Each structure stands twice: as C-alpha cells, then as structure tokens.
Amino acid sequence: MFRRWTALFVALQLAGCQPTVRLMPAPAVFASGEHSPFAVNPALERTNRIQVFYATNRLPLGPRGSRVYTILAGPTLYLGTALVRIGPSEKSWESLYTLSTGPAEGRRPELNLEILDEQATIRGSEAPDMVTPEVQRFFETVNAALGESLAKDLTIYVHGANSNIAVAAAQAAQYRHFTGRNAVVLLFAWPSAESGLRYFTDVQNARLSVPVFARLVDLLARHTTAEHINVLAYSAGSQVVSPGLAALKGLRQGNGGIRLGEVYFAAPDVAFPAFVAQLPHYIGLTRRVTVSVNLDDAVLGISQRFQGVSRLGKPDPSELSEEDSRWLVEASERMNFDLISVKPEVIPGLSRRSHSYWYDHPWVSSDVMIKLLFHIPPAARGLEQNWTAQRFRFWTFPPDYDRRVTDIMRKLRLSLFRPAAPEDANGAGSKH
C-alpha cells in the first residue's frame, strides 16, 4: 500500500504542480520569430511583472491586507488582483522579450507571486443578484481591463491538484503573458490541499467548490462587459469546471446572457462517464468545448487506478453505455465538441507520459492560445481530422504543424488584429 501511495505522490509531482513554476517555452506560433504577440498590443506594459485577477473560496486567516488563504473550502468568494514577477526584480523587458519570442534555450526564469490584493467579498448567503459597492468596483476594474485590451473576452483559469495560490497564479499569469498580454485572465483558486499525498482531499474540495464556481461564472456574466467568458481547466480543475458549468442551468433560468466562449479541458482529471453525463447540460451554451487527451498520461493512469474509473484525459470508451456512446459520436460529428489526441509519437520532443503538455510543449500551447484568442475550429488552426471505426471524430497535430501555424497566424493577424506602431514591433521602448 505504501508503494502505491508513493507512486501517486511521485506522479502528481510530475504533473507540473511544482512549488517552482518556470517560464514555459514560447508557443510554436511565436518561436519562429516571425510573429510577436506583443507587437499588436498598443497598451503593452514592458515589464517583467504581470497582473491577473483572482477569485478564491479558500477560507482566509487574518485581516484583509495580510490574508493567508487556507486549504479549507467555503461558500464565500474573495476577489482581487495578483501580481506575478518573471525572474529577478531587475530582469529587463528586452531579455524577457527574447525568451518569449524564440526557441527555448537553457534554464527558464522562475515566476513568483509578489502581491495578492484582496478587493471584495461575496458571501455565500447573499442573494445572486445582490452586489455591494466594493464588489461593483471590482467588476468595474475588470471591465476597465477589458476596455483597454484588444481581446474582449475574459478567460478563467482553473488550476489542477497539488497547487497553492502562488503556483496557480503563476500559471495563469504566463498564459496571459504569452497572449502578448492581450488576454484578460481571472484565476479561480479552489482550495487544493497543496500536497500530492492529499489528493483525495483535493477531490473533496473540488466537489465543494462546484457551486461557488458556478456562481462566479454567473456573476461575471451579469456584471462584466466580456464578449465571451472562456474557461481553461487543467487536470483536476476539470472536477470543478464540468459540473460547475452543468449547474448553470439551475442557477439561471434559461441561461440567458451567460456568454460562454471556449471551454478547454487540458489533460482533464475528471471521471469520463461523469463528464459525458454533464456535457449535454452546457455544451449548447458555449462556442466550443475542447478536450485534449494523451492516452499514455502517467498521472491520469494512476488517478484511474485509485478512483476506479477512467479519466477524461485518458478515456476508456468501454465504460460508456451504448446511448452515451452514440451521443458522444454525434457531438463529435455535428456539435461544437472537439477531442484533440496529443500523440507523443507525432509531436517532436513531447514526453510519452506527459501530463503538463498544454504549457510544456510549444505545439500544444500554441493551439490553446489560438483557440482561445480567435475562436476558430481545429481545421482552421492547422490540425488534422481523424475518425475511429465507430465514426467518432478526433483531431491530431500534423508533422508540419509548426510551419502550418506560422502561416495561419500570418492570416489571422491581417484579419483580426491591428498592428501596433512600427517602433513597438520589436518590443523596444521604455516601461509604461
């Protein structure tokens, strides 16, 4: 038994939920040097610090201004901003720009959480349509960020298991960084127990966080000007997101105005049959639902062993009933549902048992960025269509994906983004 728990601990440590987060490799679409995500941002802050919004249902200790968020789940939402620093304080924008727009070489700089600034509280006992002045001011801050951004969507990042707030904020911040800081990002920091040996505490806390997450999405839809609300759920964050989105139907009659955009499940650690049961309740509210799968995922293999059911990121189709199987095939053919098979034998440099591929590998992170920023389907993003014998459609990365995505971005920039002034194209200039 001890060896089984040790195996689980080691696998979860390999999941990418480490105490230290390092700057991920530049997505393939930018690594060639032809396209810079920063060149199209006229309001770019040339600094190694990145701000993201956050919401958490971790029970806090201490007064506002010196909070310590615990690993206990509660019904109250605490809202604010997080400031994350890439590298040491004195790291220049020019060196960070080089690291962010070219191939990964050498050791990448660390990301560290500098400031958590709590600004508002929404108690679980308050009516859904009740908004206090401080909460309204928080939403106005979000709306101001949306107004200044070229990307008018709000993206919620939901982290995985074995993750503290500093790690989760760093992951959310580097996603925002590699969009050229055009994306407005909000971290939902559910109370992970922050230990690989307490995975089942994470499972319980994820379940307790489902109604809080659903309420957050509803409030953001009601009180922000986001054109769409995107959701990027990593690993066990899917245990919060999928049932949370399904709960929206009961939270808001008719779901009018939810404005869900792209929902992306990256290496999702949620029970495969449960997801298939939940998906019909929210797929019609979204622009598109995407699932990325690695059938050799080591972490999800161990999760399946301990929980007795396959995970969405490493699914076993035999667990579905004939009716559910037919529905899923129909969803892949005619609905806004895509499954991306991340195949290590096709993608150069991808570890066969990888779980953290959405940010660790430039091809996969590139596809995530393009999907969330541009709302385009897999074929338009350069992926290849495949079919199983049962007519289930799925998508794979072609061997020449890096070339394809460079060509695709050339067209996307012309059609959707206004280029910044010529002097901004290389990222030079003073800090704002």
Image: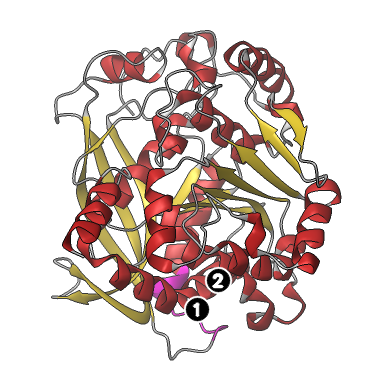
Q: Seen in the image, is 60 located left or right of residue 228?
A: left
Colour theme: secondary structure
Residue type highlighted by circle 2: Gly
- Image coordinates of residue 71 in percent, x first then y, are 23, 71
Q: Is residue 52 magenta?
A: no
**What mark, if any, has residue 211 been given in the picture?**
1
> Would you identify the image quadrant in which residue 251 lies?
bottom right
> Tag 2: Cα neighbours inside 10 Å, few (<14), some, or many (≥20)?
many
- Image coordinates of residue 288 in percent, x first then y, are 71, 50
**Which callout, 1 or 2, points at the residue further toward the start of the chain?**
1
Magenta range is: 128-136
> Would you identify the image quadrant in which residue 279 lies?
bottom right
**What mark, if any, has residue 361 been given in the picture?**
none
Whether the residues at callouts 1 and 2 have beta carbons within 8 Å, the answer is: yes
The quarter in which the C terminus is drawn is: top left
Whether residue 311 can be seen here:
yes
Name the residue carrying label 2. 244
- Image coordinates of residue 314 in percent, x first then y, are 53, 49
Please, is residue 33 above or below residue 170 in the view? above
Q: Seen in the image, is 189 located left or right of residue 367?
A: left
